[in-house]
Amino acid sequence: MKTPRPLPEELQNRPFTVVEAARAGVSHKRLRHRALHRLGKGIRSESSTAELPLSERVRPFIEVNERCAASHLTAAAMLVLPRRQQKGNPEMFHVIRPEGSAHLNRPHVIVHRMKLYSDEVTTVDGIPVTTPERTWLDMAEMLTVDELVAMGDSCVRVPRAAFEDRDMPLCSLADLQRMIDRHKGKRGLRRAKEAIKLIRVGSDSPQETLLRLAMVRAGLPEPEVNVPIIGDDGRRHHEPDLSYRKYRIGIEDEGEQHGEDGQIVRDITRSEKYHTLGWTEVRISKRHMLNDAKPAVAKVRTALVQAGWRSRP
């Protein structure tokens, strides 16, 4: 077979629509060449797309489907929200299509036809995506309550400007509640109503959220989230991930980065500071989160009892 003419540079190494190929001067004959992969009606690619960023992989599927936006697991991934890993074919993309639109059946696309308001769509890398609050509500039909709380915590947390490229939360608790109030009868609504009562501003990671929920579920008092320690002299010190000011206990979630040399030094300094301030530090690692976080809960319970806390009979 004759070697096909090279594609325009802007179409190489990524999926593209037939419409944008025509605009770039690619002939119908070239688009029919067997060297191109057909990813669905109106979508082609010269090479495998598996290693490309999600935004590049999903873009043509949104462009060929009018009035659609990336949603559910796809939106959660594009918004970098904590989520359960997708089972099955990772090249299946979730898109939402407004109620009343024509039925849509395309390969690689899971279509959700439901009520969608214009203010529930934002853009990521130029691609229409459901807003964080709408994505959270949509995911209520797929996630457990705890997973939904972790996603909600991530939505409402205040970013740390020194380490992130934003300084505002993705949305507010009021925004999440507005979604619940707006979409009466939606699948997962009961789970969303249960989860929103447990969402707290301040949690920096899903593991912090899951630890907090496990502690409360086990009958421990609810800890504060990322509240700074104030010394007896009124000076403000670091913020424990979770804490009990009354009992002078700080709980620190040891993520994977805590094995790095620089972080180890910082952790030692932090432990020394706890001792100087007269506080007890409880360090929780991944192994303590096994078995529904029972080892972590037991460790915190021991520290609380030693500090004078007593559970109610």
Image (cartoon, grey):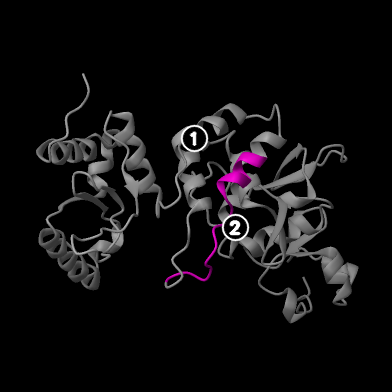
Q: Amino acid at mark 1?
A: Lys
Q: Is residue 66 above or below residue 271?
A: above
Give the number of marks. 2
Tag in front: 1 or 2: 1
Q: Quick check: can you spot residue 92?
A: yes
User: Is 165 a magenta residue?
Assistant: yes
Q: Position of residue 105 (x, y in %)?
A: 79, 41
User: Is 25 a magenta residue?
Assistant: no
Badge 1 density bin: few <14, some 14–19, many ≥20, Cα 10 Å? few
Badge 2 density bin: few <14, some 14–19, many ≥20, Cα 10 Å? many
Q: Amino acid at mark 2?
A: Met
Q: Position of residue 55 (x, y in %)?
A: 64, 62
What span is colored magenta in the figure?
Answer: 163-178
In this image, 21 relative to 246: left or right? right
Which residue corresponds to mark 2? 78
Which residue corresponds to mark 1? 197
| Residue visible at 56% across and 31% down in the picture | 193
Q: Is residue 22 above or below residue 124?
A: below
Give the alpha-carbon distance from disc 1 to disc 2, as whole Å: 26 Å
| Residue visible at 24% across and 48% down in the picture | 245
Element at label 2:
helix
Name the image quarter holding the C terminus.
top left
In this image, 94 relative to 21: left or right? left
Which residue appears farthest toward the front when viewing the image?
233
Which residue appears farthest toward the top when viewing the image?
313
Q: Is residue 262 above or below residue 223?
A: below
Overall secondary structure of the magenta section: loop
